[in-house]
Image (cartoon, rainbow, N blue to C red):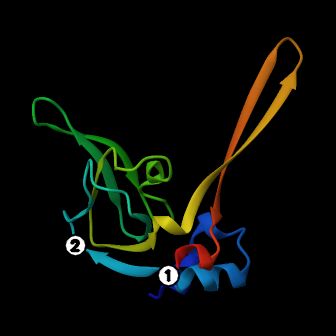
Amino acid sequence: MTAKEALEKADFFSAASAGSRDEIAGFAYIRRYGKGARVFYDREASTCLYFLVEGVASLYKINSLGEKKVIFVYGPGNLLNEDSLQRLTSAVTCEAREDSLVMVLPAELFKLGKDYGVCSGDGTLIEMNSSILLRPKQALR
């Protein structure tokens, strides 16, 4: 599978135009992970975003007793390290639970955008909608 095909299948990018997906595909690549392989580690620098294209992956932490505690199990179409958009390091370890294909994108292509809406009634409410915005190519050079 190519990065372009993976982008077309990913719900995460469904609202993006075909031209935007083509441009993003120029920076993406597909990596194959065997069962039990680590996609990324807890406290690892967050330099890439990982989208699960095929297979199953789990996010876990090791507790103080050295036990693996699974936090999430993801199937195809999921962003595996969403926290990387807000942090400099990963907060969990990700492991392929079966043979998997993962699309990898440089995190520097994206920034987190936040829209704040304030509603009043009985009080003040702040609504936060997060979105991911592609940075212009010039910013990468």
Quadrant of the image occupied by residue 53: bottom left
Mark 1, residue position: 27
Q: Is residue 81 left or right of residue 121?
A: left
Label 2 is placed on what type of residue?
Answer: Gly
- Vertical relation: 19 (above or below) 51: below
The image position of residue 7, as x and y in percent, is 56, 77
Number of marks present in the image shown: 2
- Vertical relation: 32 (above or below) 43: below
State yes or no: discs 2 and 1 in contact (Cβ < 8 Å): no
Quadrant including the N terminus? bottom left
How many residues crowd mark 1 within 10 Å: few (<14), some (14–19), many (20+)? few
Element assignment for label 2: loop
Quadrant of the image occupied by residue 81: bottom left
Quadrant of the image occupied by residue 61: top left
How many residues crowd mark 2 within 10 Å: few (<14), some (14–19), many (20+)? some
Residue at 43% across, 47% down: 87
The image position of residue 134, as x and y in percent, is 63, 68
Element assignment for label 1: loop
Examine the rendering and report whether any part of residue 8 can be seen.
no
Q: Is residue 122 left or right of residue 97?
A: right
Q: Nearer the viewer, residue 61 or 111?
A: 111
Label 1 is placed on what type of residue?
Answer: Phe
Mark 2, residue position: 34
Residue at 58% across, 79% down: 24
Instruction: Give the Cα distance between marks 2 and 1.
Output: 23 Å
Examine the rendering and report whether any part of residue 49 can be seen.
yes
